[in-house]
Amino acid sequence: MASLLDRVNTLISANLNWLVTQALKSNSMAVVEEYIRRVEDNLDALEDAAATVGGEAKTLKRKAEEFQAKVEELDRNINLFLQKGKDDLAMAAQHRYNTMKTLADRYREQYDFQEKEFQSLLNAKLRLEAKLTEVRQERTQLQAMLDLAKSKELTHKVVEGVAGVTDAEAGLKEIREEIQRRLDKATAQGEIAASRLEKQMSDVLEEEQLRNQLAERKARLGIK
């Protein structure tokens, strides 16, 4: 999974300006289309990995809860045996309690790890989807600008053959600068959206943690 996240982080951090520069140099959208294809492929891989890891996390959580329930039952039984003077039964129950407690703790640790992995995959998926949306939004307008740039280049070549460097070259430069300005703005908007999304996810996770802590405290106090 580490290699998948590495690939995704590389795609997320891809410089859109570089993609456009390559498109302009080659007068082709091939490099942009290839980037989109790679993003889509990795989104599919992310979704599959997230489903797998999320399913494993749910299984581990269920196992942890099952063993924890046995631990709590044994804990009550030990107290009962001791109160009735059944020390042999209490000792046997204590031995089983220790085993169940170890298993419950182990499953809980595994669940915590898998849950973190699951959240990492979901976060990467959301960020990559945001990047894909950004590129797709720019692709249509970039194609139109690229077509215009090709037209300007053709005009430039014709005019240059007659009178040397003219306004055609200046027009081509202006188009490229306009593309650059749009990309800079889109990049800034993408960073703002990603920051907002990460803040929302952090708030939700913190709220869930607080709920769990209060639930555990109520359970200890016998509050329903």
Image: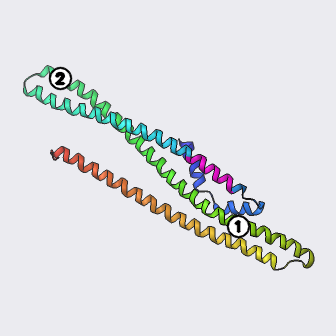
Measured as percent of width and height from the top left, residue 150 is found at 79, 67
Residue 40 colored magenta?
yes
Q: In which quarter of the image is residue 144?
A: bottom right
Q: Which element carries disc 2, helix, strand or loop? A: helix
Measured as percent of width and height from the top left, residue 213 is found at 26, 49
Judged from this view, the residue extending furthest toward the top is 88
Q: Which residue lies at the image location 73% right of the left edge and 75% below the top edge?
A: 174
Relative height, residue 146 to residue 128 (above, below):
below
Which residue is disc 2 drawn over?
Answer: 91
Query: What amino acid is labelled 1 in the image?
Result: Ala
Q: Which residue lies at the image location 72% right of the left edge and 55% below the top edge?
A: 30
Relative side of 113 to 95, left or right: right
> Which of the pair 186/13 is nearer the observer?
186
Query: What amino acid is labelled 2 in the image?
Result: Met
Question: In the image, which residues are magenta?
Answer: 32-43
What's the CA distance linking mark 1 and mark 2?
80 Å
Q: Which residue lies at the image location 42% right of the left edge and 45% below the top edge?
A: 116
Callout 2 crowding tier (Cα within 10 Å): few <14, some 14–19, many ≥20:
some
Residue 106 colored magenta?
no
Relative height, residue 32 to residue 1 (above, below):
below
Q: Which residue lies at the image location 76% right of the left edge and 76% below the top edge?
A: 171
Relative side of 138 to 149, left or right: left
Which residue is disc 1 drawn over?
Answer: 144
> Which of the pair 42/136 is nearer the observer?
136
* Magenta stretch, overall SS: helix
**Mark before the other along the chain sequence, 1 or 2:** 2
Q: In which quarter of the image is residue 189?
A: bottom right
- 1 vs 2, front mark: 1
